[in-house]
Image: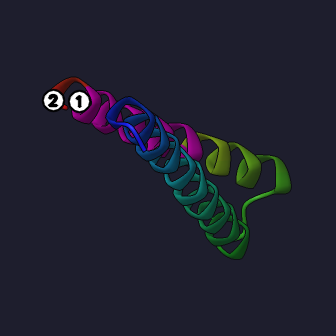
Amino acid sequence: MSPPTLRLVLLLLALALIVLFGLITGGLAGLLAQHAGASHTTALLRAGATFTATATLGLAALTLAAVAL
């Protein structure tokens, strides 16, 4: 593979891992909220907030890595 293609593949792989990690952390946050006695709505809000925070931090790190490369 040529270097620009390899760079694109690595960035897409990193993006996929960020989304996967965000889904896992969001799901666990919702599960923990449900286990703690929160309503379904509150658990979904906590899961969404956790996913958003994880995605934001991951994309910030990915942007930093893309600029550094």
Considering only vertical position in the picture, is 58 above or below 64? below
Magenta stretch, overall SS: helix
Amino acid on which disc 2 is placed: Ala
Q: Name the residue rendered at 15%, 29% in the picture.
A: 68
| Quadrant where the image shows the C terminus | top left
Look at the image and say whether residue 61 sits in the magenta stretch.
yes
Alpha-carbon neighbours of circle 1 within 10 Å: few (<14), some, or many (≥20)? few
Residue 22 at x, y percent in the picture: 55, 52
Number of marks present in the image shown: 2
Residue 57 at x, y percent in the picture: 36, 38
Amino acid on which disc 1 is placed: Leu
Q: Name the residue carrying label 1.
A: 64
Q: Residue furthest bottom?
A: 35
Alpha-carbon neighbours of circle 2 within 10 Å: few (<14), some, or many (≥20)? few
Is there CB contact under 8 Å for labels 1 and 2? yes
Q: Name the residue carrying label 2.
A: 68
Judged from the image, the secondary structure of the residue bearing numbered disc 2 is helix
| Quadrant where the image shows the N terminus | top left
Q: Name the residue rendered at 28%, 29% in the picture.
A: 66
Considering only vertical position in the picture, is 21 above or below 60? below
Q: Give the range drawn in magenta.
A: 50-66
